Amino acid sequence: MALHHVRIDGIAPFDYDFGGNIRARMADVGRAMGSQTIGLTIQTVTPGCQSSRRHRHVFQEEILIVTAGTGTLLHGETQVPVRPGDCFCYTPSDTELHTFENTGTDDLVIWAFGNRFRHEVCLYPDEGVAFVEGLGAEIPLAAAVDSAWTEERRKR
C-alpha cells in the first residue's frame, strides 16, 4: 500500500485575494498528500485582513483550529475573540455566516479541515453570489428562481 506522506514545510503556499482586506496565504495539505475527500488547508492571515469572504456552506462540514496569532471569528453578527487552541465546527445546518479577521499584531494561522464535495455550494450573501463547485462558477443569488424539481417538493 502506498504511504501518503508530506512535510508541511515542503508544501508551497499560495496567496489568494478577494479584494480589499480579504486576502491570505494558503498551503493545501490535503491535496498535497493526495487526499480524495478530506480537505486540510493552512491559512495564514496578516494583521488587518480576513481569511475569506463571510460565507456558509450548504453541504460541507468544517473544523477550524486556530494554531497561532490572535484575532476575531466573525460568527453571524457576533465577534468572538480567538487565540491558539480555539476550535470551531460548522455543519451544513449552521446558517451563520463566518470568517476570521486578524485583529492582532502577528500572523493569524488557521488549520481548516472540511469535506471536498464536487456538489458543494458556498453562499456569499454579502456579495450576492453562490459558488457552485460542480459548475466552477459563482451564480448571482438575485438570478435564482424557485424550482419544483427538488426532493422536498416532489414528495407525494
Image (cartoon, rainbow, N blue to C red):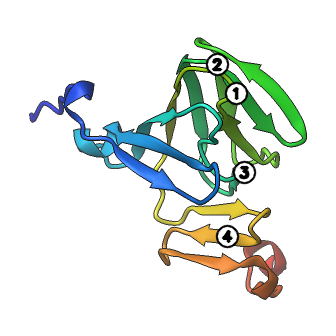
Q: Nearer the viewer, residue 16 or 106?
A: 106
Q: Position of residue 33 (x, y in %)?
A: 24, 38
Q: Identify the residue under disc 2.
A: 70
Label 2 vs label 3, nearer the camera: 2
Disc 4 and disc 2 in contact, CB within 8 angstroms: no
> What amino acid does circle 2 point to?
Thr
Q: Which residue is mark 4?
A: 130
Lateral position of residue 68 relative to residue 142, left or right: left
Q: CA distance from mark 3 to mark 1?
A: 16 Å
Q: Is residue 70 above or below residue 54?
A: above
Disc assigned to residue 64: none
| Nearer mark to the viewer, of 4 and 1 | 1
Which numbered disc, 3 or 4, marks the residue closer to the eye? 3
Q: Earlier in the sequence, mark 2 or mark 3?
A: 3
**Three-letter code, disc 1:** Thr
Query: Which image quarter is the N terminus in?
Result: top left
| Residue 87 vs residue 68, the one in the foreground | 68
Whichever of callouts 3 and 1 sits on the residue coming sooner in the sequence is 3
What kind of element bears circle 3? loop
Which residue matches tag 1? Answer: 103
Outermost residue toward the right in this view: 77
Q: Which mark is residue 54?
A: 3
Please tell me in which quadrant of the rendered image residue 63 appears: top right
Q: Nearer the viewer, residue 45 or 154?
A: 45
Question: Distance of mark 4 from mark 1, alpha carbons?
Answer: 27 Å
Query: Can you tell which quarter of the image residue 40 is in?
Result: top left
Measure the C-alpha gap from mark 3 to mark 4. Answer: 12 Å
Hey, what amino acid is under mark 3? Answer: Arg
Q: Is residue 81 left or right of residue 22?
A: right
Secondary element at tag 2: loop
In front: mark 3 or mark 1? 1
Position above or below: 19 against 12: below
